[in-house]
Image (spheres, rainbow, N blue to C red):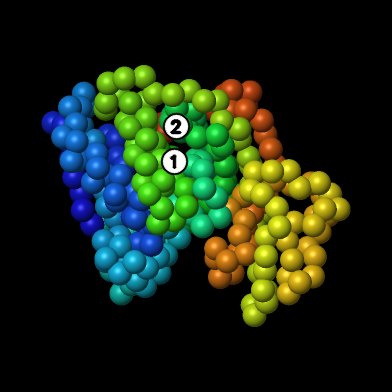
Amino acid sequence: MQVHTVGDGAPEVAVVGAVHGDEPCGARAIERFLESEPDVDRPAKLIVANEHALERGVRYVDTDLNRCLPGDPESDQYEERLAAELMDEVRGCVALGIHSTVSYDRPFANVAYLNERKREAVAHLPVESVVDFTVVADGRSVELPGFVDIEAGHQGSAAAVDNAYDCLVAFLQTADVLPGDPPAPDPDVYEVTEPIYKEPGRTYRFRGENFERVPAGERFATVDGEDLVADEEFWPVLMSGDGHDVLLGYRSTHRGPLSTLPEPEHGDATADPPADEATD
């Protein structure tokens, strides 16, 4: 794991890239930012997390880093040990995690257990959509009280690197690390209601568009050529026939613009969750 610090003092802000080794956009955006020799107003950490997987171009070496937080420093699995190290690095920080996907070209933000500081962060990212993953957040970084993630675009693309960099800069402006005013796009919020799993050995094709409403009774995918029809309306999120071995994607509901949602309860956005709660 690479940990770079800009500015003087103990950082309370972090950016994390390459949690998955086959999603290099975060690492490339961090490299671009560091090469610019930024003049910062407060310190921040920039972390390239899963170096071994990144070098191999694979999602993970032993197990998915973004499903095993808070990790185990005594584990015989590399990512579980790495997860414990990453938790130590981001403890007490407000943090942005950078990912990419094969299912959608444009950047969007991911949150869970939305609090005041997370809402402030996602309100100023250059994205059109925010997805609330609270119901399926177990073991993911977005469950941490100070963490938001982005999906920067299509995995491996130059556009994903550009989007990741733009989100990194906006996040650091919002956190008062960089001077300047971040954007305020008022993104639409989608709340995940359930995952849709694949049956092994079958061929899936997604026939809709992510973040576009699927009415009840409409086909949204095929399985071995047979239609999958919505039993009630939903909005697809991260849905793709070939993006994941066991997951087709997620159903969600459209909550409306972020500005119309009730204000979250006040609380410490950087505090660690209770020991008996799972974290991302």
Residue 42 position, x and y percent, is 21, 27
Q: Quadrant of residue 199?
A: bottom right
Q: Residue furthest right?
A: 217
**Residue farthest to the bottom, as pictured:** 201
Q: Name the residue that disc number 2 marks.
A: 125
241 vs 43, nearest the viewer: 241
Question: Circle 2: is it few (<14), some (14-19), or many (20+) Cα within 10 Å?
Answer: many
Q: Is residue 253 left or right of residue 42?
A: right
Residue found 26% across the figure and 27% down from its top = 177
Residue 196 position within the rendered picture, expressed as x and y whole percent measured from the top left: 67, 61
Residue 214 in the image: above or below residue 200 = above
Label 1 environment density (alpha carbons within 10 Å; few <14, some 14–19, many ≥20): many
For badge 2, the amino acid type reads Leu
Left or right: residue 64 compared with residue 92: right
Which quadrant is home to the N terminus? bottom left
* Residue 116 visible within the image: no
Q: Report the mark closest to the observer, 1 or 2.
A: 2
| Element under disc 2 | loop
Q: Residue at x 34, y 39 (%)?
A: 165
Q: Are marks 1 and 2 in contact (CB under 8 Å)?
A: yes
Label disc, if present, on residue 224 of the rendered structure: none
- Side of 171 relative to 263 (left or right): left
- Type of amino acid under label 1: Val
Residue 94 location, x and y as percent? Answer: 35, 36
Q: Mark 1 vs mark 2: which is more N-terminal?
A: 2
Residue 17 or 161: which is nearer the viewer?
161
Q: Does residue 149 sit above or below 198 in this rendering? A: above
**Closest to the observer, 151 or 260:** 151
Q: Quadrant of residue 250?
A: bottom right
Q: Position of residue 246 (x, y in %)?
A: 59, 69
**Residue at the spot of label 1:** 148
